[in-house]
């Protein structure tokens, strides 16, 4: 696959993978992307998972067609991209390795050598000229490890973005980008929102035509759409108005209350997503919690604590800086319910959370009192900032595209004082598009 005349795709698809990073289900497999730049000098961008080393080396050899290989650029040392480095050095002993100093230290740990005689150490602002192509290196610490660098090819306006803008799923399966990119981002990079924001600010200064991530498809159209989603996710803003109800239920009584609440919210026009934490994909449930504006947690008191799946779920949220949302609680207990208090306590260090005024206390099974609490909670959640389905704006709106970064503004008119949230430029750089 050609990314441009000189840049070709040499990555692989993995359909045998069980769990990505040892924990994420990937029903549509995984892609480990790698690219080769053919110029006066030749450079390979990252390697692939160790199960695909030979397939990758064969692809390199086919592209080189007898030419010398000059550089391997290592942007990220997580083994899904770095496991083939050692075999690469055997196949191409003369090639230099271009990477950050932190990455070379990691190579020593992984391979017992930091390839001292092959090192080209790069940092923020370093450049590497391949002939026609100039590679500009951008540090991206904690997106998603501390050694990460991104690479901008100023000739073809290509950003090699490491894990950023990646998604789950092999490239030979067609699926919606945002769904699996969001689950990937929130699960894997979600804790590092401020670092992603810092990289987005650097990227805003670059003229980018194509994004080549280490997972998922190459992005070359409507880049503002993807960048805007990354801006929302990394700033912990809800992407959509809606209520997520995450619950555990032992004998069905908590579930009954959850379903009743969901029905009442839907009847009021709210978008509602319900997740049974004992049975659903936990990463999907975490993704939903970050996607929507309001979260209801329903669980039982268990061993004077809360049900284990709920404890684990809240840990997943808080360790990823869950914030800027409304949270409500439903507790169930037969003799001494403490679940609501414990759940609320688990968010003690979270920022910018609003707790609903109404908490539902079920003693074993719903009765008149707890049903009334449930109705009051539905009323509270549906009021205020909830944008009901009926109230959502209807009809086509106009679209204005930032001519610098591709950000799309939707609305009847573009305000004169509008400032692009990505590149900080004013309304004058926006053009109306179809
Ligand atoms: Fe795709 Fe952080 O490795």
Image (cartoon, helix red, strand yellow):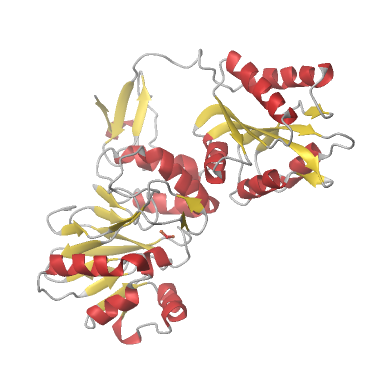
Asked whether residue 239 appears in the rendered view, the answer is yes
Lateral position of residue 429 relative to residue 297, left or right: left
Where residue 272 appears, x then y in whole percent?
A: 57, 25
Task: Establish if 331 lies above or below 304.
Answer: above
- In percent of the image, x 48 and y 55: which residue is there? 195
Comparing 378 with 423, the one in front is: 378
Identify the residue at the far front of this view. Answer: 251
Q: Residue at x 44, y 68 (%)?
A: 147
Residue 383 seen anywhere in this rendered image of the structure = no
The residue sitting at 19% across, 52% down in the picture is 3
Residue 142 at x, y = what percent?
Answer: 48, 60
User: Compared to 14, does 89 lie above or below?
Assistant: below
Question: Disc count in the image?
Answer: 0
Is residue 358 depicted above or below 109 in this figure? above
In this view, the residue farthest toward the bottom is 117
Quarter of the figure with residue 62: bottom left
Residue sitting at the far right: 335
Q: Give above or below for 64 relative to 162.
A: below
Instruction: Using the image as rendered, state which of residue 386 and residue 14 is in the foreground.
Output: 14
Q: Quadrant of residue 270?
A: top right
Q: Looking at the rendering, in which quadrant would you find the C terminus?
A: top left
Residue 194 lies, in percent from the top left, at 51, 52
Q: Quadrant of ligand 1?
A: bottom left
Residue 103 in the image: state x and y as whole percent: 41, 73
């Amino acid at each position: 696959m050609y990314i441009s005349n000189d840049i070709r795709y040499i990555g692989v698809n993995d359909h045998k993978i069980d769990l990505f990073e040892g924990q994420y289900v990937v029903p549509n497999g995984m892609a480990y992307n790698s690219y080769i730049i053919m110029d006066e000098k030749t450079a390979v961008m990252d390697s692939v998972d160790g199960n695909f080393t030979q397939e990758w080396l064969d692809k390199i050899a086919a592209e080189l067609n007898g030419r010398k290989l000059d550089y391997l650029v290592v942007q990220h040392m997580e083994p899904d991209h770095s496991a083939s480095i050692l075999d690469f050095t055997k196949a191409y002993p003369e090639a230099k390795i271009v990477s950050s100093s932190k990455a070379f230290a990691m190579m020593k740990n992984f391979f017992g050598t930091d390839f001292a005689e092959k090192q080209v150490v790069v940092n923020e602002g370093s450049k590497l000229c391949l002939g026609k192509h100039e590679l500009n290196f951008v540090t991206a610490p904690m997106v998603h490890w501390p050694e990460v660098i991104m690479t901008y090819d100023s000739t073809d306006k290509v950003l090699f973005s490491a894990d950023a803008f990646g998604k789950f799923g092999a490239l030979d399966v067609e699926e919606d980008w945002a769904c699996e990119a969001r689950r990937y981002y929130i699960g894997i990079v979600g804790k590092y929102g401020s670092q992603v924001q810092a990289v987005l600010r650097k990227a805003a200064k670059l003229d980018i035509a194509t994004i080549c991530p280490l997972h998922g498809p190459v992005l070359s159209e409507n880049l503002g759409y993807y960048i805007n989603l990354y801006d929302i996710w990394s700033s912990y803003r809800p992407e959509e108005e809606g209520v997520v109800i995450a619950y555990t239920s032992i004998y069905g009584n908590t579930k009954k209350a959850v379903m009743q609440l969901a029905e009442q919210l839907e009847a009021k026009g709210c978008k509602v997503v319900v997740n049974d934490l004992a049975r659903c994909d936990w990463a999907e449930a975490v993704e939903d919690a970050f996607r929507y504006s309001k979260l209801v947690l329903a669980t039982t008191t268990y061993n004077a604590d809360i049900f284990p799946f709920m404890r684990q779920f809240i840990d997943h949220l808080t360790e990823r800086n869950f914030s800027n949302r409304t949270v409500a609680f439903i507790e169930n207990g037969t003799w001494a319910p403490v679940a609501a208090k414990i759940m609320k306590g688990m968010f003690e260090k979270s920022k910018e959370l609003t707790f609903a005024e109404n908490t539902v206390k079920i003693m074993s099974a719903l009765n008149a009192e707890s049903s009334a609490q449930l109705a009051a909670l539905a009323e509270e959640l549906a009021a205020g900032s909830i944008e009901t389905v009926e109230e959502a704006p209807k009809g086509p709106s106009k679209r204005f595209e930032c001519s610098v970064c591709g950000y799309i503004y939707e609305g009847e008119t573009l305000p004169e004082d509008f400032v692009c949230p990505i590149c900080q430029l004013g309304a004058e750089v926006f053009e109306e598009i179809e």
